[in-house]
Image (cartoon, rainbow, N blue to C red):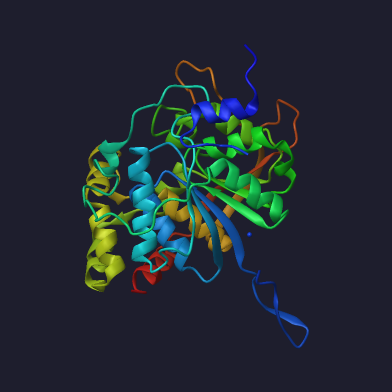
Amino acid sequence: MHVTKRQFIKTISVGSAAALLPAWVFASGKPTADPVKRIILDSDTATDDALAVLMAVTSPRLKVEAITITCGNVGFDQQTKNALYTLELAGKSGQIPVYQGSARPLVRQVHGNATYVHGSDGMSDAHFPDPKQKPDKEHAVDAIVRLVNANPGELTIVAIGPMTNVALALLKDPTIAKKIKELYFMGGFYKFYGNINPGATYNAWVDPEAARVVFQSGIPITTVGFDVSVKSSVFTDEDYVKVEKLGTKYSDFFMKINRIRRKYCKEHQKMNGSNHPDAITIAAVIDPSIVSEKVSRFVDVETRGELTLGALAIDELGVWGKQPNATICVEADEAKFKKMVFDTLKMS
């Protein structure tokens, strides 16, 4: 039976998939401020995603046009509530639309969840009250296609979860690949190790076919990997003491949502605190100087490996003879990142 693209999207997604700034500020003819980046934040919102959402929506350097929810960390509706609650906490309720996208990977069964890292509610069992804002009725895939087509060359997609929604948008309208300004992906690593199998990290592993669609699309991609988060985003016990002493609404939120994650990272990943990969990814979008070293490489995604499913295959020696399709962050400035997080948590 022939299945159309529209039927495919409708089948594997929740809801229906039927079928927007400030420029340079000049003084005396010279630019005095960076332009505000307009982003679509694609998230499977749980603990670390929530910090990234908070940083994004409170940053004067970003304008979040939409938050799109993808399959990933915990229950789909719970992820949506987590994003909406974080917006409400930030005083942005009703100001930024939240769209639900695909509740499952492109072709695979739902992988389960990561409640062992994030708690049953994705927020370390904080069980926050239901937010006032509800998700928009438009499907996330439709929203991505509409927003990109309406703003060619202006929108950055920040994918801090599995890239199912982005892949579906590309399958629905392949022309948007040339209209997306750039894409940041939290996933993979450079000369390091995986956190879901020895060769892969969670976001690519959940939906490797989707990741492959995106990496083969021609969109300018920057990856911020698990390795960068382990090296440069770990909040130690000393950092937690400093956060708690802030005594703000946001610092209290940080302490609550990281209770289970903090314990997991220390006991199971042998860190001296909790790492924050989604947060350091959004930090790199806000201030690219946080990335202190990067390389350009051709990257593909393993979709059939028995032991390394979801691995980002980085052609270090150019053996495939292909031009680089991704910029890979290698090192980041830990002090700059932590200052950004502390500055955010001090705001409330």
274 relative position to 52: left or right = left
Return the residue found at the far top.
Answer: 1
Tell me if residue 297 comes above or below residue 82 in the rendering: above
Residue nearer the viewer, 147 or 300: 147
Quadrant location, the C terminus: bottom left
| Residue 259 rendering spot, x and y as whole percentages | 22, 51
Tell me if residue 304 comes above or below residue 334 in the rendering: above
> Which quadrant of the structure image shows residue 19?
top right
Quadrant location, the N terminus: top right
| Residue 93 rendering spot, x and y as whole percentages | 40, 64
Residue nearer the viewer, 209 or 128: 128
Q: Do we see residue 299 in this rendering?
A: no
Return the residue found at the far bottom.
Answer: 28
| Residue 127 rendering spot, x and y as whole percentages | 22, 51
> Which quadrant of the structure image shows residue 61?
bottom right
Residue nearer the viewer, 315 or 153: 153
